[in-house]
Amino acid sequence: MSNPILLYTAQIIAMMSLTLLAIGYLKAQPQAASARVFALTALFAILYIVDGMSEAHVDSMFYINLARWELLIHTAVPAIPGLFMIYSFLEFQEQKRFPVVLVVLFAIQIVLEATLVLLDNGNGVAIDVLGLTLDILQLLFVGFAIFWTVSGWSADLVEDRRVLRWMIISLQGALIFLVVVVENFLVVFGSIALDEAQLVLIMAIAILVTAMVIATMRFDYVSLSKVIRKVAVLTEEASTVNSADFNIDSFNRQFRDAKIYREAGLTIASLAKKLGLPEYRLRAFIHKTLGYRNFNAMLHQYRIEDACEALADPENRTVPVLTIALTVGYQSITPFNNAFREIMGVTPSEYRKRKLSGD
């Protein structure tokens, strides 16, 4: 049997750290949707911890009767993987639309989780299959979160956010995945005792969120140290000074005029090599001087501007849109159409029609 005092201490530490993270994130980015989703995820994580205090094996000194809150808690807690997925998308997939099918799946999951609670987690093959399906759905959501976190790693120009990506995929994502597997599979099938699983998971959560509180001081989400904030400011100023000798004119002369952006599969590493710059300096220049947070966003901007000129040229009236897309650096028509619509608000064909008709 697990040590009740150790378990209770870990629960309190985890809840306090989660509260600090949520408040700090909301304070730093009050208007950001990702901050609100993160805060909601933290709240549901606290509910998960509190729910653990209502288990039958819990020492009577720390036991809490949550019977009247069962519907709320047992609907909210399974939503954590879905919220984590949404958070990862908002944080790392800027200027993209969230897949509608995932919205539908998430909504269905919430409804079915509530239904299971109302059915009092009854027995039967149908109930077991439904429960297993919902568990797999949670793992799917975590998988999407990890994919979105990893997919934009190399193109991300915000250095602190690149570190944040590592934290999310290696820590948060792994922990949520672990909780889902342990509680919904290992405990259910008797591979590990519930009290042992609870202690391990709560300790892991406490260690993780405490580490995140300390780490987020670097990102200034939780302003706990003036010294760290001062060091962060000095580091940023030094980086700006180091990039001063490479200005916008020299960048445009080599990148825009030479049309380097047309190279298919161009990465920030290959561009840095072409420009004769260290990659970290090029990242800092594009982010701080040009104002882009993502390398691919910059590529899209230059390529779409080039495409607009071609589409508006009467001499290119008969040139297929696909040919123009391939010319400016895209490898297929779909990403070109998506980027064009996102930046210009219309499709390439509509844009061409308006320009050539004089609108």
Image: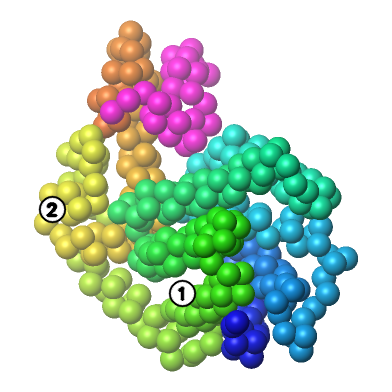
Q: Residue at x 61, y 75 (%)?
A: 195
Dividing the picture into quarters, in which one does residue 239 lie? Answer: bottom left
Question: From which residue to which does the magenta span run?
Answer: 331-359
- Please say whether residue 336 is one of the residues in the magenta stretch: yes
| 68 or 268: nearer the viewer | 68
- Mark 2 neighbour class, 10 Å CA radius: few under 14, some 14 to 19, many 20 or more: few
Query: What residue is rendered at 50% in x and 18% in y?
Result: 350
Q: Secondary structure at mark 1?
A: helix
Residue 103 in the magenta stretch? The answer is no
Residue on which the image places disc 1:
219
Quarter of the rendering containing residue 78: bottom right
Q: Quadrant of the N terminus?
A: bottom right
Q: Is residue 27 visible in the rendered structure shown here?
A: no
Percent of width and height locating residue 353: 47, 14
Q: Is residue 72 above or below residue 197?
A: above
Mark 2 lies on residue: 273
- Which color scheme does this rendered protein use? rainbow
> In the image, residue 104 lies at what x, y percent?
66, 37
Left or right of 318? Residue 66 is right
Q: Are marks 1 and 2 in contact (CB under 8 Å)?
A: no
